[in-house]
Image (cartoon, rainbow, N blue to C red):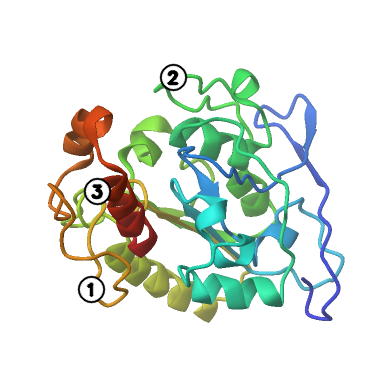
Amino acid sequence: SSPSGRPIIWKASASSKTGSRTSTSRISASHRCSRAALALLALAACAALAACEPAESRQPNILLIVVDTLRADHVGCYGHVRETSPTLDRLAAESYRFERAYATAPWTMASVASLFTGLYPGSHGVTSTSRLPNEALTLAEILQSRGYATAGVVSHVVLGRTYDVHQGFDRYEDEVPGAAHDDISTGRVTDRSIEDLEGLSAGKRPFLLFAHYFDPHYNYLPHPEVDFAPPRVGRLDATQTIKELRAMSGDLSAEEVAFIRDLYDEE
């Protein structure tokens, strides 16, 4: 919302990179209640992501948070009975919350490319593990052309510079030191994002900061401080990788499936 509390409605209208045409697109948040590869929970940013002409003269800062494979029905503000997302729930209580929004693709790169371009995969071209075309006009590029400072911190290889998803970002951290699938996200991405927020806030330009999290994707790690899951159920003790769980998927007991759901909720 704007500094006055009124919602900001953007209408994205910007010249293409070649300057030969003008493209208009509506950048919208994507959210899918499924085991899709992307779940967007940028609840505070959603109202500001629809375009690029703020209603107020002061351009808003934008923090866009994307969480990979986060099911809507496992988030409190979308009806989950467990307190899996207390901070998001508090934010949702005083923000705009979309009840029906859907990812355009069931995997990370294509869905994020759609989020950034406002286009379906068939239009932006990322229908397999391929690069985002240079001619695609991204949210970061539109904002950058409006004077925004732009930064991104990502935790998944398919969002790395190799695939050109970083178009329009002044800084793009895609190699978080020491990151691995068992601890790829929260601590390191948050620390880097906070550093960026502090630096961007100290500047005179409005900014876009994009932070991408991976925790609910895999592996499912225990978090004793949350304590949803017991130490062990049947053959499972939270040391199994996603590949091992997939190999066991046809032979899991109901109790073991519930244990995996508990670990997912802890993540």
In the rendered image, the quadrant that contains the C terminus is: bottom left
In terms of image quadrants, where is residue 226?
bottom left
Q: Residues within 10 Å of mark 3 (few under 14, many from 20)?
A: many
Please tell me whether mark 3 or mark 1 is closer to you in this view.
Answer: 1
Identify the residue under disc 2: 128
Q: Is residue 135 visible?
A: yes
Q: Which residue is mark 1?
A: 224
- Three-letter residue code for mark 1: Pro
Where, quadrant-wise, is the N terminus in this rendering? bottom right
At a point 67% along the width and 46% down the height, the residue shown is: 142
Residue at image location 22% in from the left, 65% down from the top:
230
Contact between marks 1 and 2 (CB within 8 A): the answer is no
Is residue 246 at least partly visible in the picture? Answer: no
Give residue 60's position: percent from left, percent from top.
Answer: 70, 69
Work out which residue is located at the far front of the displayed protein and give it. Answer: 254
Q: Earlier in the sequence, mark 1 or mark 2?
A: 2
Label pair 2/3, CB-CB below 8 angstroms? no
Q: Mark 3: which amino acid? A: Asn
Residue 67 in percent (x, y) is at 46, 53
Give the class, few, some or many, for how many residues have Cα within 10 Å of label 2's Cα (few <14, many ≥20). few
Label 3, secondary structure: give it: loop
93 displayed left or right of 151:
right
- Amino acid tagged 2: Ser
Distance from Cα at disc 2 to Cα at disc 3: 23 Å
Q: Secondary structure at mark 2?
A: loop
Circle 3 is placed at which residue position? 219
Is 30 placed left or right of 8 in the picture? left
Q: Is residue 135 above or below residue 145?
A: above
Q: Secondary structure at mark 1?
A: loop
Question: Marks 1 and 2, how far apart in space?
Answer: 38 Å
